[in-house]
Image (spheres, rainbow, N blue to C red):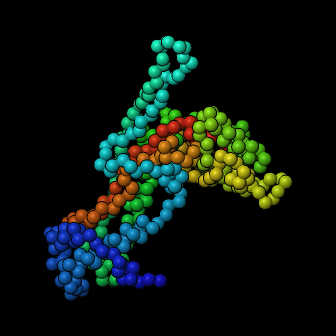
Amino acid sequence: MKSYKDEIKGINPDPRQVYALKNSPTLLQFLSNDQTGNIRLDSAEASVYHFLRDLEHVKIKVLEVKYPELTARKIFPVDNTTPEGAEKTGYEIVDYIGGAKIQANNTNDIRRVDIKSDWIDVKVKQVENFYDYSFRDIRAAQFSGRPLQQTKAKASQRDIEEQINTIAWAGDSAFKINGVLSDGNGIIETALSATMANMTPEELNDAITAKAAEMHSASRGVFSPDTLVLPPAQYDRLFDARFLQSTDLSPGQWILKNNRHVKRILPAPELMADSGVNRFKVPVGVLFEYNRDYIALEVPMAPTMRAPHPTLTGFQVLNEARVAGAFVKQPLSARIITGI
C-alpha cells in the first residue's frame, strides 16, 4: 500500500492558487500565530503547498468514489455541449411540410416543400454547496502527516450527484425542467397485461418482446428500443426466473441473446414506488433507444470543486454543477411501462 507521501508526490497545485493563498490575510495570520512550540512550520510557502496538495489528494479520492445507486448518468446519454455560463439552453424540433405529386404536362401547380421548426427553451439550474476546513483541521493533518478528512468532500459530492440525479429523473416543476418521468415530456405510457411477479417465464419473455415490437411498429420502424430499465425487484424476477424447458436460461438472458431490439437491461432503484422521484407511486419501467439525438440528460457542467477560499477560521471549498434535466427530443423513441 502506498504511503500518503507517495500518493501526493505527483500532485502539483495551481500556482495561481498558491499565490492567492500566500497573500491571504487569514492564511498569514494563521501562519504567524502558529509559533506555539507544538507545531513548527518551516515556511509559509511550504505550508501553502502542504494544504493545497492535501486538498487535491482529497478531491482525487472523492472523485474515485462510485455511487451506482444514482443511475441517471449511467443509464441515459449525457449532453454537455451547452456552455457552462448559459442561463438557458434548448433544442430545435424540425419537421417537413409539403410534398410531391404526379405532375401533368404544362401545369404550374407544383407543390412547395419547406420545413417548420419549434425551439424548446429550458432553464439551466445551478446546483452548489460547500465544505470547509478549519485551521485546526489543517494543523492536525500537517502534524500527523495524514491527509485531510475526506468525509466532508464526499458528503458534498454525494449531495451534488443526488440533485443531478433527481432532476434527471423527476425534473423540477418550479424551474419548468423536465425529467425522464415528468408528466408532459411526451413519452407514451403503456401497461403490461399482468404484473411481472405473476407471469411465467414464457409470459415475461412474450410481454417484453411485445412492448419492444409495439414501440418499433408505432414509430413506423424509425425507433428501435435497445435499453430496458426496471426496478430492482422486477429486474431480479426477469433474471431469476427459469424457462420450464431449460434451467439454464432466464427470460432476461433469452431477451438479451435473441431479441433483435433490446440489448441492454438495467436496474434502477429510482423506478421503485417509494423512490421519491417516481411520480407514479407504483413500480414502472422505461424502454428507450439509447441515442443522444433522441433523449439526453443536459449537464452543462459536471460537479466541479473550486479552489479553496480563505475565511476567518479556515478555508471553504465550493462544489458546483449546472443541469437542465432530460431532453426528450423524440418522444416516440421511449416508453414508460406501467403495471409491472
Q: Residue at x 35, y 59 (%)?
A: 304
Kindly give the residue lying farthest to the front in the view shown: 106
* Position of residue 232 measured from the top left corner of the image (x, y, whole percent): 62, 53
x%, y% of residue 280? 56, 39
Work out which quarter of the rendered image holds the C terminus and state it.
top right
Of residues 170 and 143, the one nearer the viewer is: 170
Residue at left 33%, top 62%? Answer: 305
Query: Between 241 and 76, which is closer to the camera in this rendering?
Result: 76
Name which residue lies at 30% across and 80% down.
142
Q: How many marks?
A: 0
Spot the residue most to the bottom.
37
Q: Does residue 333 sit above or below 64 in this rendering?
A: above
Front residue of this view, candidates 190 and 156? 190
Q: Residue at x 42, y 65 (%)?
A: 63
Residue 296 position, x and y percent, is 48, 46
> Would residue 180 appear left or right of 177 to someone viewing this image?
right
In this picture, is 289 found above or below 319?
Answer: above
Q: What is the x, y in percent for residue 337?
A: 62, 40
- Residue 137 visible in the snapshot: no
Q: In the displayed image of the protein, which residue is found farthest to the right?
A: 245
In the drawing, does residue 42 fall left or right of residue 286? left
Q: Is residue 30 left or right of residue 159?
A: left
Q: Is residue 74 left or right of residue 252?
A: left
Q: Is residue 125 visible?
A: yes
To which quarter of the image does residue 225 belong? top right
